[in-house]
Image (spheres, grey):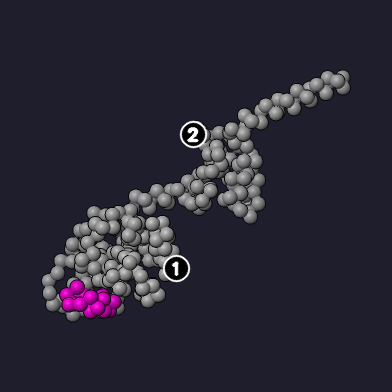
Amino acid sequence: MRRVAGIALAVMLILTAFALPALAKGMTKQKAANAAKKLFRDFPFEVVSVKESKVKGLWQVALVLENRYRILYLDTDGKVAILPGPETQGHMVDLERMASLTNEATSELGKIDFKTIPLKDAIILGDKDAKIQVAVFDDPY
Amino acid sequence: MKQVVEERKDIAFYLLMYPAAHPQAKDAIDYAMCAKTNKERLERFEKSFDKKPTPKAECETDVVERYMAFGKTIMVSGTPTMFLQDGSRLGGALQKEELLKAIDAMKSAK
């Protein structure tokens, strides 16, 4: 009887050993916790569950933070997060740089070619030959 | 902006008259633009922040109309809106520190 139990345990260990690399390709609680740590820093939180979301490659991570359940979406590498909720407005965040990719995309759209701005009729504040020029659309109100 | 140019001689602001939300500012701006020198224009412009009635402009100018037309093409919706030389857009009134941070970030990126 004891022998059978021993074999069963060995089989389980082998299975686990094979299962681990397969899991590592996806998302684990530990991996999710490491990624979430970048966001929540010193706030204590606990990852409750991890499962694949309806979007391929995007993992739905449930956690408890400040006594509340929260959902976080992570990519498989744990490098990009999407944060639902009113505070973060669903921004996509680069966890390695801790920068909002959503904000960066928006400001990229607002970029223009500086040389196209007609500066001829500008009122100049500072030295007109200064190396750094800033064009300011302004009015007295 | 004033504090910035006092502190940093390598920075100049080019103020483009853009009374998008305040068409009534056109008179004050025209009065400023009619001044002969930049120094005098700047003085008149700064005075217009008091929002007191300004003397009538002594010339005719369409600077406001031209900047309004140009601003629309690049979707400038409010003032102040700033553009740095790399083309990036900074909207809204920024603190001196924030402004310098953005300017210097651009410098180091080049």
Q: Compared with residue A5, is residue A111 higher up or lower down, i.e. above or below?
A: below
For image coordinates 34% across by 60% down, the residue present is: B84
> Which stretch appears magenta?
B31-47
Residue A98 position in % (x across, y down): 52, 51
Residue B94 position in % (x across, y down): 40, 66
For image coordinates 38% across by 57% down, the residue present is: B110
Three-letter code for the amino acid on which mark 2 is drawn: Val
Q: Which residue is mark 2?
A: A55
Residue A22 position in % (x across, y down): 62, 29
Of B57 and A80, the residue lying toward us: A80
Q: Hey, which quadrant is residue A10 in on the image?
A: top right
Helix, strand or loop at disc 1?
Answer: helix
Q: Hey, which quadrant is residue B108 in on the image?
A: bottom left
Using a 10 Å C-alpha cutoff, classify the residue at mark 1 as few (fewer than 14 neighbours), some (14 to 19) or many (20 or more).
Answer: few
CA–CA distance between discs 2 and 1?
Answer: 41 Å
For image coordinates 22% across by 72% down, the residue present is: B29
Residue B9 position in % (x across, y down): 36, 73
Q: Compared with residue B49, is residue A133 higher up or lower down, i.e. above or below?
A: above
The disc label shown at residue B97, or none: 1
Three-letter code for the amino acid on which mark 1 is drawn: Glu
Q: Is residue B59 left or right of residue B19?
A: left
User: Label 2: chain?
Assistant: A
Q: Is residue B99 magenta?
A: no
One can see residue B60 in this view = yes
Of A76 and A42, the residue lying toward us: A76
Nearer mark to the viewer, of 2 and 1: 1
One can see residue A141 in this view = no
Of A116 and B94, the residue lying toward us: A116
User: Label 1: chain?
Assistant: B
The answer to whether the residues at label 2 and label 1 have Cβ atoms under 8 Å apart is: no
